[in-house]
Image (cartoon, grey):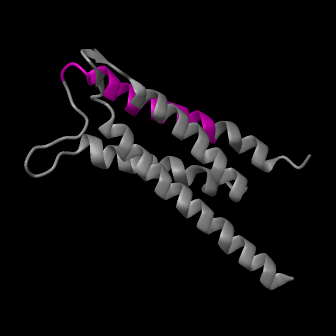
């Protein structure tokens, strides 16, 4: 019985690692979708994707491991990836998150995603400690 419990914990934490990798990939895709145009109209699908991923992925991690660390890890992975890929430039000076016209979409991805993730992590926190 103890070996089965330990095996279940390892499997659950492996699921959280996969969710964290999904969060990092989602951050990269959201950063690349910022300058998306349909003809001459800017389509802010990246903001919607950032909001959805930062609400859904912590909830998915909570389903695997009901601990605060497990809930916060996908959000932290998303933050590290979006800041690493989008904000800091490469040695050549290239930056993935553009300025100029789609700048408000880049800010929406950064701020909206960060706010949605923080609200999700904080709102899940009291329910993890509840016993009834």
Prevailing secondary structure of the magenta residues: helix
Q: x and y percent of residue 26 in the render?
A: 44, 45
In-image side of 46 versus 32 (left or right) = right
Residue reaching furthest to the top: 41
Magenta span contains residue 132: no
Report the front residue among 101 and 67.
101
Q: x and y percent of residue 95 in the render?
A: 19, 41
For image coordinates 41% across by 51% down, the residue present is 25
Q: Residue 66's image quarter? A: bottom right
For image coordinates 38% across by 38% down, the residue present is 30
Asked if residue 13 is positioned above or below residue 50 in the image, the reply reads: below
Count all numbered tags in the image, as a single digit: 0
In-image side of 75 versus 37 (left or right) = right
Asked if residue 54 is positioned above or below residue 91 in the image, the reply reads: above
For image coordinates 33% across by 34% down, the residue present is 33
Magenta range is 100-121
The N terminus sits in image quarter: bottom right
């Amino acid at each position: 019985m103890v070996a089965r419990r330990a095996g279940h914990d390892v499997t659950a934490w492996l699921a959280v690692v996969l969710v964290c990798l999904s969060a990092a990939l989602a951050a990269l895709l959201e950063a690349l979708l910022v300058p998306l145009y349909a003809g001459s109209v800017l389509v802010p699908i990246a903001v919607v994707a950032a909001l959805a991923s930062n609400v859904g992925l912590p909830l998915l991690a909570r389903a695997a491991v009901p601990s605060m660390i497990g809930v916060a890890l996908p959000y932290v992975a998303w933050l590290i990836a979006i800041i690493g890929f989008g904000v800091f430039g490469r040695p050549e000076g290239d930056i993935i998150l553009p300025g100029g016209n789609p700048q408000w979409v880049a800010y929406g991805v950064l701020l909206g995603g960060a706010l949605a993730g923080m609200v999700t992590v904080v709102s899940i926190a009291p329910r993890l400690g509840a016993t009834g």
